[in-house]
Image: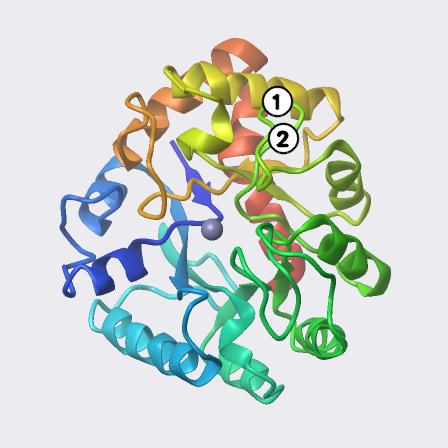
Amino acid sequence: MNFFDLHCDTISKCFFKRKKSMLKNKYHIDIERGKFTFEKWFQTFAFWMPDTINSDKAYDLFLKQYKYMEKFELPIYSKSFDSDFKAILMVEGGLLLGKDISRVDELKNKNIKMLTLTWNNENTIASGALANGGLKPFGKQVVRELEKKNIVVDVSHLNEESFWDVVKIAKKPFVATHSNAYNVCGHVRNLKADQIREIKNVDGIIGLNFYKLFLEDNCRNGIDALMKHIDYFLKQDCEDVLSVGSDFDGADMPDDIKDITCVPKIKQHISKCFGEDIANKIMFENAKRFFEKTFN
Ligand SMILES: [Zn+2]
């Protein structure tokens, strides 16, 4: 099968766990298992940094993680899917920009394709799901600059006020790389119905997150819970919007989705419940189409 994942934290996980190998490890994703599991595999890798450090430290941490990642000589996606495995790069947490707009250029030069504006707390751009307040004046400048440089705005992690402020000024499609439906699982990181409608309206995409706490309260069967989210999204006419943003190596997974080798089993369930065409769209085609439209 083919798999397109809009979000994992494997680079940061390996980096923080004393620089373990991305090629082979015991975490949710390594390159060896991914390549073995899929025919075509387009995997987004996030550079994550905590909210608790200052912006210069965060930028420095990004550069260190980047240098570490380069050791593995991954085929990094720039503008075409010309091999069966591509690593797409994103940054999770706009904190690293500080108040320096020129850092957007640096991200562009390093082939960063998406920026999650915040993590869970407040930064110089906006406020995350656990904080109050909307998009700041510098944040507006950031959204415009990202759009100008063709880096996609990721609204996962934003609080609602910041989300709607982005909606007001965005001129290009934005995405929620790793968020589920709030009406199925009422977690503050999940998307309300009107947010889902808005992302669909702007031709963005949404990545289904496998994190236990975003799937269901007291999640026992992750795949069953995931089917409930998919059912809900499909009822909101999101057949062409829905993708996957697994959150592998960034969150606790349910027992039945222990790592990337479980993805074929998830696809089988989607096929069984909603048909094979929908399964192909969610697991691969919707995200691929979005990337081709955006970066070709
Ligand atoms: Zn995240």
Task: Give me the residue at 74% from left, 62% from top.
Answer: 134
Q: Nearer the viewer, residue 192 or 152?
A: 192
Q: Could you say where residue 119 lies in the image, as x and y percent from the top left?
A: 52, 59
Q: Secondary structure at mark 1?
A: loop
Callout 1 amino acid = Val
Q: Nearer the viewer, residue 237 or 153?
A: 153
Q: Nearer the viewer, residue 154 or 61?
A: 61
Task: Give me the residue at 49% from left, 27% from top.
Answer: 215
Q: Residue furthest front?
A: 132
Q: Is mark 2 within 8 Å of ligand 1?
A: no
Marks 1 and 2 close (CB-CB < 8 Å):
yes
Residue topped by disc 2: 181
- Mark 1 to mark 2 CA distance (whole Å): 6 Å
User: Is 58 situated left or right of 37 in this image?
Assistant: right
Res 19 → quadrant: bottom left
Residue 184 is labelled as 1
Res 207 → quadrant: top right
Res 150 → quadrant: bottom right
Callout 2 amino acid = Ala
Q: Could you say where residue 115 lies in the image, as x and y percent from the top left?
A: 56, 65
**10 Å neighbourhood of mark 2: few (<14), some, or many (≥20)?**
many
Task: Give me the residue at 73% from left, 19% from top.
Answer: 235
Q: Could you say where residue 52 lies in the image, as x and y percent from the top left?
A: 42, 68
Q: Residue furthest right?
A: 168
User: Is 266 situated left or right of 158 in this image?
Assistant: left
Residue 83 in view: no
Q: Secondary structure at mark 2?
A: loop
